[in-house]
Image: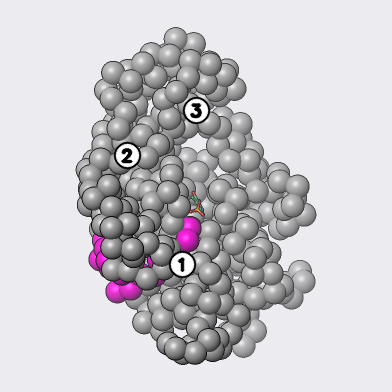
Amino acid sequence: MLLLSGPNIAGNEWKYVKDCLDTGWVSSVGSYVTQFENMLAEFSGCKYGVATSNGTTALHVSLMLAGVKQDDYVIVPNVTFIASINSIKYTGADPILIDVHPGTWQMDLDLLEEFLENETDEKDGQLFYVKDGRTIRCIMPVHVLGNTIDLTRFMELANRYHLPVVEDATESLGTYYKGQHTGSFGLMGCFSFNGNKIITTGGGGVIVTNNEELARKAKHLTTQAKSDPFEYIHDEVGYNYRLVNVLAAMGVAQMELLPSFVKRKKEINDFYRSALQGCGDISFQEIAPEVDCNCWLFTFRTSKQRELLKLLNEKQLQSRPFWVPMNQLRMFKDNIYYNHNDCSGTIYSECLSIPCSTNITDAELETVAQAIRSIY
Ligand SMILES: *Cc1c(COP(=O)(O)O)cnc(C)c1O
């Protein structure tokens, strides 16, 4: 089976993991955790990095630190992986789902602006949803597939409405907007190192921020909120959300490979775009010239989506549809979904992702492209 986006263990992973096993520093204390945190902070242009057990826990803690509480709202795009919304629900808040743009498949900023203008109001510097008076505490953009919205306009909107930003940058490690790394625009940004992401630790996450106090609090909350180095004194309800040293060791090795991975993802993207260009009704995700995209997961749009999914998976070429839009899931069907013509639904029925692991060969790419071309 040719994997959609599999791990590529090609560098010092064995060496650094062996070092942990040899020295006994396998668990929550050890130098690789700090090294990995520093690498992520430096790479993303942020001052601080805090490692977590995965991207979902990174989002959960970031939302809590942004002040999100029971019965608040958090604005988020309707097309994303479930973890974005789950992390909101863990805080007791509810998502306000904003439809996506037909070309970029990211949160539609015209809709967002319209929503903020028409459906919200401000009292004592705090935004609320007019229909029920509940507080809108935070906004979470998701850099879907490594692409991003116009972050200049987005940040201007967020600032105008006094909305703290927590970036779901779990898919966008290696993506820049006007030369600035994603994850560094908001109050906090979250990365994921799940097995399918551009680099992996098996499972893991990092929160990046330029705010020292938030970084300190994130470390505290993710390590059971222990407030005394010796005695078991905990000053609030904390979480066991840390990344262990063995996995951080793997992460350090993967970070060394990241530039080569981004380069390969871009090559794969260029290959598919030219090989599938003009083929039936195939169209591609719009990437603005200001975006330097990591091209994490190659995805395209066609009315023959279902047919292709069946054909490719039968040929052992792992392919997947896009996520079911959040408003179509049982748990979120009654949540606010701001849209005009449900672009999310169309995108869901037409998009598919195809094999684009960084260790895919040129011959394998050709095989995938040929299989796709054969049905048009
Ligand atoms: C991968 C991912 C996450 C969560 O990351 P985990 O490390 O799997 O918990 C969150 N949001 C999006 C959009 C993702 O793709």
Circle 3 SS class: loop
> Does mark 2 have its CB less than 8 Å from ligand 1?
no
Q: Amino acid at mark 3?
A: Ser
Looking at the image, is mark 1 or mark 2 earlier in the sequence?
2
Circle 1 SS class: loop
Q: Position of residue 158 (x, y in %)?
A: 49, 70
The reply to whether dot 1 and dot 2 touch (C-beta < 8 Å) is: no
Q: Position of residue 166 (x, y in %)?
A: 48, 67
Circle 2 SS class: loop
Q: Residue at x 34, y 26 (%)?
A: 272
Looking at the image, is mark 3 or mark 1 earlier in the sequence?
1
Q: Residues within 10 Å of mark 2 (few under 14, many from 20)?
A: some
Please identify, in this view, whether the residue under mark 2 or under mark 3 is nearer the observer: 2
Q: Quadrant of residue 111?
A: bottom right
Q: Amino acid at mark 2?
A: Asn
* Residues at marks 2 and 3, CA–CA distance in whole angstroms: 18 Å
- Residue with the mark numbered 3: 319
As drawn, the label of residue 144 is none
User: Is 165 situated left or right of 290 in this image?
Assistant: right
User: Is 37 one of the magenta-colored residues?
Assistant: yes
- Residue with the mark numbered 1: 242
Q: Which residues are magenta?
A: 34-54
Q: Position of residue 130 (x, y in %)?
A: 72, 72
Looking at the image, is mark 2 or mark 3 earlier in the sequence?
2
* Residues at marks 1 and 2, CA–CA distance in whole angstroms: 24 Å
Q: Quadrant of residue 71?
A: bottom right
In this picture the colour scheme is one colour
Q: Is residue 217 visible?
A: yes
- Residue with the mark numbered 2: 8
Q: Amino acid at mark 1?
A: Arg
Q: Nearer the viewer, residue 91 or 326?
A: 91
